[in-house]
Image (cartoon, rainbow, N blue to C red):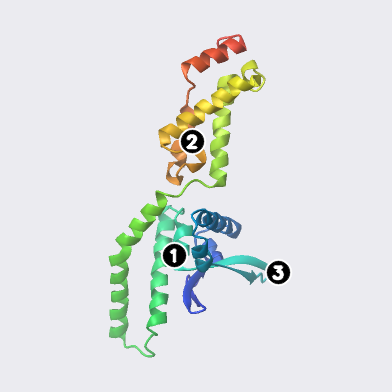
Amino acid sequence: MTQLVFIENGRAVTDSLTVAHEFGKEHKNVLRDIEIQLHKLAEADEQEWGVLNFERTQYKNEQNGQWYPKFDMTEDAFAIVAMSYTTPEAMKMKVKFLTEFKRMKEMLHNPPIPVLDSNTAIAIALRQTADVMDKLPQIESRMDRIENTTTIDYAQQRALKKAGSSRVVGFLGGKKAASYKHSGIRSSAYSALWNDYQEYFGINSYNNTLKKDCERGLKYVASWTPPTNLLLEIEEINGQKLF
C-alpha cells in the first residue's frame, strides 16, 4: 500500500508524485496545477506562505538514473492543489489524505506506544475515526469554499476561447465571408459575445470563469446569438440573408 503522508524535516508532508499516483494523473499535470496555485498565491501577495508550504525538491528516476523536479506539500498545500479534483473518487481520496495527515501529525506529537494490547488498539482506532468524522463537515465546507473560488485552468480557457471563435465565425458566414474580413464587424461580434458572457456569469473576463461553471460556459457560448442590429449589419455586408 502506498504511503500517502510521511515525515520530512519534522513535519507531515506528501509529495506531487504520490498525489499524481493516487489521483490517477500524470505527474507533469500535477506539477502544472501546483505552479498555477503558486502563481495565484504570488498574485494575492501570499508568496511567503507558498514557499513555506510548497517545497521544491527532486527525485531520482529508477529507470534512467536522472533527477527530476517534484514538490513536497504540507496538509494545507495539498488541500489547495487537490481542490479542483472533484469527482466522487477524488473526494474519497482527499479524505484519505487528510485523515492520514492527521494521523501522522498525531504521531509527531504523541509517539506511538511500543506495545499495545488489542483493546487499546481498537480504542485508539475508534477515537481517530470519531475525530475524522467530527471534522468531516469542516473539511467539506472548506472544499466547497475552495471550489467556489477556483477559476478555469489554461486548457479550459483555450477550449472556451475556441468555442467562442467557432460560434462567432459561424454567424459571420465563415472566414471567407465579407463580414468576417470586415475588422470592425468581426471585432463587434467577438465583443458582443464576451460582453454578454461576462454579464451572464458576473465576471470581468471569460478567463475568470469558475471551474464549476466551465460546462455551463461552453453551453452558453454554443447557444449564444448576436443582437438583432449586429445580425442585420452582417447580412448587409455579406449581401445576402444568412440567418
- Under circle 1, the secondary element is helix
| Alpha carbon distance from label 2 to label 3 | 41 Å
Residue sticking out furthest to the front: 45
Percent x, y of residue 196: 46, 29
Q: Left or right: 134 with respect to 42? A: left
x and y percent of residue 15 in the render?
53, 67
Query: Could you give the CA–CA distance between mark 2 and mark 1, rounded to whole angstroms?
Result: 32 Å
Residue 36 lies, with reference to residue 186, above or below; the image says: below
Q: Mark 1 is on which residue type?
A: Asp
The residue lying toward the viewer, choosing from 183 and 115, is: 183
Q: Which residue is mark 1?
A: 76
Mark 3 or mark 1: which comes first in sequence?
3
Residue where numbered disc 3 is placed: 66
> Distance of mark 3 from mark 1, alpha carbons?
30 Å
> Which amino acid lies under the numbered mark 2 shown in the image of this protein?
Leu
Tell me where residue 147 appears, x and y as whole percent: 41, 51
For label 3, the SS is loop
- Identify the mark at residue 218; answer none if there is no mark: 2
In this view, the mark in front (2 or 1): 1
